[in-house]
Image (cartoon, rainbow, N blue to C red):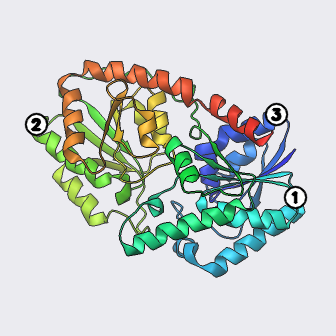
Amino acid sequence: MRVLLVPNTAASMVWFRLPFLQALVARGHRAWVAAPEGTGVDRILATGVGFVPVFQSQGWALGGDASAKASYTDPFVDLAYVRDVHRICRVLRPDLVLAYTHKLTLLVPPAARAAGVRRVHGMVTGMGPAHLRGGPRQELTRQAFHATLRAASAALDSMIVLNRDNLDDVRRLALAPFCTPWLMDGEGVDTEAFDAPAPRPEAGRVTFLMVARLVRYKGVEVFAQAARRVKAQYPHARFVLVGGVDPNHPDAVPEATLQSWRDEGIVELPGFVSDMARVYADADVFVLPSDETEGLPMSIMEAMAMRRPILTTAVPGNRETVEDGVNGWRFAKGDVAGLAGHMQALLAAPERVTAMGEASRDRCVRRFDHRVVNAALLDHLGL
């Protein structure tokens, strides 16, 4: 079968879906990725999957230029993008198209259908902050978000979501009235590539790791504030925040704030790191204090595979990864005291870090291994 995958960046296919590309090729399908040229193209081609450049990025991509980021809300760019995808579909004649992210689930299906593609699916990789209630402006954004999903469903065979909360929302709010909503358990993690012995830290010397874009809704400031509290009692505890700075993102943490944390000595900020297995192996506990709904974070799944306990917020997506008291703890979004309390408990009883880490690995292998996840997706798509 001829399959076209349309993500917002080539890098996202490498970070999140490379095993899926390999599985497509292994099953004998001919596949292409259509995305802006950039980081990751060589690794896509190495799988045996073709690559077709799309003229413009759709969304904020780390390392992308300012014009690409500014274009995210430009309707003329959207129309040009739709024409580009339509042209690609006319040339490649795919039997099936799978688009990733909310924006591309809206733009790609009509273009594919107009080009004669018979099977079209969209994956909404996370509902994001646009899905949440707030003031009048936020409510208008939320209603627009829901309306676009409903409109997109008319051109889809299925709308794929990554956690049970999002599936419940799609059903409860009738966000996919014209297609089938379908649950995929995250995007899968390679539990063979991500594996390490469970950590065995000393009392008072635990290293806490957070990996995320340095934007506020990921809970970066909560992590730093909890670190400040904990360091007052446990000065040898370490707090490492790995992630790239994107100053053009509207929710970016200001560089002045990051520098103040460096100067205070509460958080280590190594920036963007490519060797993530080494990053997890050098830490004892993984933390993701997101303020908003997630899909099902790859960072948490990778840390689980590496036998690290998880401390994360009880928001959609995150909460599915943790069984309280078994492989970590959940806490309320924005709860600095709650996060700090869990950190202090592990610093006082480091043997729990080892036990919880083993439980993380077991949970990840059973539920989030990419072989399990991708087999289910391929079957759903009829591939």
Q: Residue at x 17, y 28 (%)?
A: 204
Image quadrant in which you'd find residue 375: top right
Q: Tell me: 369 left or right of 197.
A: right
Quarter of the image with the C terminus is top right
Q: Residue at x 54, y 57 (%)?
A: 173
| Label 3 environment density (alpha carbons within 10 Å; few <14, some 14–19, many ≥20) | few
Residue 93 visible here: yes
Q: Residue at x 63, y 34 (%)?
A: 373
Image quadrant in which you'd find residue 312: top left
Question: SS for tag 2?
Answer: helix
* Label ID, residue 92: 1
- Residue ID for mark 3: 27
- Residue ID for mark 2: 233
Query: x and y percent of residue 12 in the render?
Result: 60, 51
Query: x and y percent of residue 75 in the render?
Result: 63, 79
Query: x and y percent of residue 3 in the render?
Result: 81, 49
Kind of residue at badge 3: Arg
Report how far apart the C-alphas of labels 1 and 3 lie in the structure. Answer: 19 Å
Report how far apart the C-alphas of labels 2 and 3 lie in the structure. Answer: 55 Å
Q: Residue at x 77, y 39 (%)?
A: 24
Badge 2 vs badge 3, beta-carbon distance below 8 Å: no
225 is higher (above) or lower (below) than 383: below
Badge 1 vs badge 2, beta-carbon distance below 8 Å: no
Badge 1 vs badge 3, beta-carbon distance below 8 Å: no
369 is higher (above) or lower (below) than 187: above
Q: Tell me: 167 left or right of 241.
A: right
Kind of residue at badge 2: Gln
Q: Tell me: 175 left or right of 45.
A: left
